[in-house]
Image (cartoon, rainbow, N blue to C red):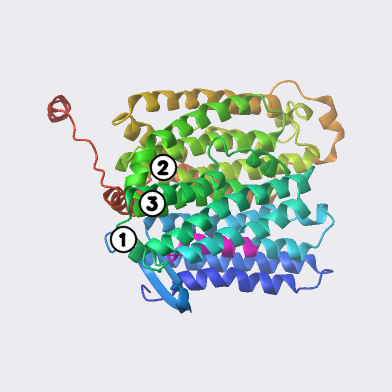
């Protein structure tokens, strides 16, 4: 199976499925949903086969494919996956079928075409897979930009209040970031010998000044996409206006393109610039952790609150990346996966609550657990996972980031730890105001609030809960895949883990 063209097939398959779904009759919405769901399951099955075929102890990049595209410019359809990309591809494959199930009635409530909605989700899956699988810088840039289109229409056509404003803001922010990256891509092509192949570019010796400018072009694009402070303001609007399923993919996967891009392109291609910019990036990370957490505490809109929590979490990922230790780097990549699972679950459950109440305002709830106890319990679990409770997957990644950072930069690790305290505040207060306490009398007048989780919704949340618990106790299958890629990235930038002190070694020996 190692010779099977996994990455090209995985990229094309959702696009073919989208075309099939888009041309199904509008008067048969159930058929469109079923075809989209089955198609996403086929992509999941193929992704599982790729995961099994991946050799964690083998070459850094596997499943490499290359097909000529624009020979005059040195552009090709080149795909390859290391352990970091593989983990993100599996996250996409797991989340998309669950999002389709969770969004079963979202398009109907918006009174727009149901087949188009689910076709857009499959197009989005195609572009997300492509951006993580690309091993050609120009191909990566194409997927990076095209990925905006399906999400723009999902927000602008199927979103809630202020959806058009949020969609345009999302598009413009991402487009500006893309322009910075385009300039850097062209510059890299010029200094890199007129090639876009990642492998060849990683071997080019770029001068200090040029490397810093090119790094900055890529970093600005990725910082906006992630989003890091102070480039974050588009996310609360987009996350608050998007349908819950689309928001889960936006925060769970799309934003990870930013942190993935830093790991794949900024660090290996511009090692000197990465080291030079690291203190600034760490500062942005810790500011984002504290600032976004404080803003989350004061939110009255559920989806905007979850969006702000994600900005804080991306601060942790940024700190883990720029700490330049294998522990922190592995924690950052694991955080990318675990945040996708936990926040994806939180967004989907919040969406279920909002669809029942008809409002996303926390003040319109209160005591909802008395009417929908199972849904309230899942919300509580998702909240605990989001604040990284021990026993849940995010705890492992957050712990690795903090301990890996502490070995090289104690002040940053200590300040970042404040985010854990603030996370407990905004999550527990959100749960208390929505599902606990005195029952809000207006809830009893809403028919939807008398319906607890149905079978379809239980099928949506059960796999995510299981994965969060499993990886909370046994993350080894994932860390074994991530570690070699992270170690190779640290080697690219010329950083090694600090040696333990004599006292530490003696204590360990005892």
How many labels were placed on the picture?
Answer: 3
As drawn, 265 above or below 9: above
Looking at the rendered image, the disc whose residue lies closer to the viewer, 3 or 2, is 3
- Residue occupying image coordinates x 46% and y 46%: 216
Relative depth, front residue between 418 and 52: 418
Q: CA distance from mark 3 to mark 2?
A: 28 Å
Q: Position of residue 297 (x, y in %)?
A: 62, 25
**Mark 1: few/some/many CA within 10 Å (<14, 14-19, 20+):** some
Kindly state the secondary structure of the residue where label 1 is placed: loop
Residue on which the image places disc 2: 332
* Image: magenta residue range: 122-136
- Residue occupying image coordinates x 43% and y 40%: 472
Looking at the rendered image, the disc whose residue lies closer to the viewer, 1 or 3, is 3
**Mark 3: few/some/many CA within 10 Å (<14, 14-19, 20+):** some
Residue on which the image places disc 1: 204
Q: CA distance from mark 2 to mark 1?
A: 27 Å
Q: Quadrant of the C terminus?
A: top left
As drawn, 303 above or below 214: above
Tell me the number on the disc at residue 210.
Answer: 3
As drawn, 205 above or below 436: below
- Residue occupying image coordinates x 57% and y 42%: 343
């Amino acid at each position: 199976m190692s010779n099977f063209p996994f990455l090209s097939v995985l990229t094309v398959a959702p696009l073919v499925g989208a075309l099939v779904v888009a041309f199904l009759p509008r008067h048969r919405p159930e058929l469109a949903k079923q075809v989209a769901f089955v198609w996403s399951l086929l992509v999941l099955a193929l992704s599982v086969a790729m995961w099994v075929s991946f050799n964690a102890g083998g070459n850094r990049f596997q499943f490499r494919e290359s097909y000529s595209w624009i020979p005059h410019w040195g552009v090709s359809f080149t795909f390859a996956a290391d352990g970091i990309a593989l983990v993100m591809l599996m996250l996409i494959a797991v989340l998309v079928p669950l999002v389709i199930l969770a969004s079963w009635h979202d398009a109907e409530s918006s009174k727009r075409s149901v087949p188009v909605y689910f076709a857009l989700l499959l197009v989005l899956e195609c572009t997300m897979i492509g951006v993580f699988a690309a091993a050609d810088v120009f191909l990566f840039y194409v997927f990076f930009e095209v990925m905006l289109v399906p999400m723009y229409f999902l927000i602008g056509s199927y979103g809630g209040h202020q959806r058009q404003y949020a969609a345009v803001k999302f598009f413009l922010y991402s487009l500006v970031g893309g322009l910075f990256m385009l300039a850097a891509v062209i510059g890299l092509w010029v200094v890199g010998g007129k090639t876009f192949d990642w492998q060849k570019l990683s071997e080019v010796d770029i001068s200090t000044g040029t490397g810093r400018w090119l790094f900055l072009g890529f970093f600005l694009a990725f910082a906006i996409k992630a989003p890091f402070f102070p480039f974050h303001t588009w996310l609360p609007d987009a996350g608050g206006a998007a349908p819950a399923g689309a928001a889960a993919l936006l925060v769970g996967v799309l934003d990870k393109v930013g942190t993935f891009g830093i790991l794949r392109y900024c660090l290996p291609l511009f090692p000197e610039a990465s080291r030079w910019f690291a203190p600034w990036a760490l500062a942005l990370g810790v500011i984002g952790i504290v600032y976004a957490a404080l803003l989350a505490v004061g939110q009255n809109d559920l989806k905007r609150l979850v969006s702000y929590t994600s900005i804080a979490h991306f601060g942790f990922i940024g700190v883990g990346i720029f700490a330049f230790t294998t522990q922190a780097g592995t924690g950052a990549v694991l955080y990318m996966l675990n945040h996708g699972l936990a926040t994806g679950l939180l967004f989907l459950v919040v969406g279920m609550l909002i669809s029942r109440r008809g409002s996303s305002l926390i003040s319109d709830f209160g005591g909802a657990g008395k009417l929908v106890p199972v849904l309230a319990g899942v919300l509580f679990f998702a909240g605990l996972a989001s604040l990284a409770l021990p026993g849940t997957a995010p705890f492992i990644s957050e712990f690795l980031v903090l301990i890996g950072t502490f070995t090289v930069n104690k002040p940053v690790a200590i300040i970042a730890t404040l985010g854990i305290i603030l996370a407990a505040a905004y999550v527990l207060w959100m749960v208390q105001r929505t599902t606990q306490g005195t029952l809000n009398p207006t809830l009893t007048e809403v028919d939807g609030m008398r319906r607890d989780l149905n079978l379809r919704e239980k099928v949506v949340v059960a796999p995510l809960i299981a994965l969060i618990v499993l990886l909370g106790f046994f993350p080894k299958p994932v860390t074994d895949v991530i570690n070699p890629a992270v170690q190779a990235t640290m080697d690219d930038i010329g950083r090694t883990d600090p040696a333990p002190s004599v006292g530490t070694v003696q204590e360990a020996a005892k």
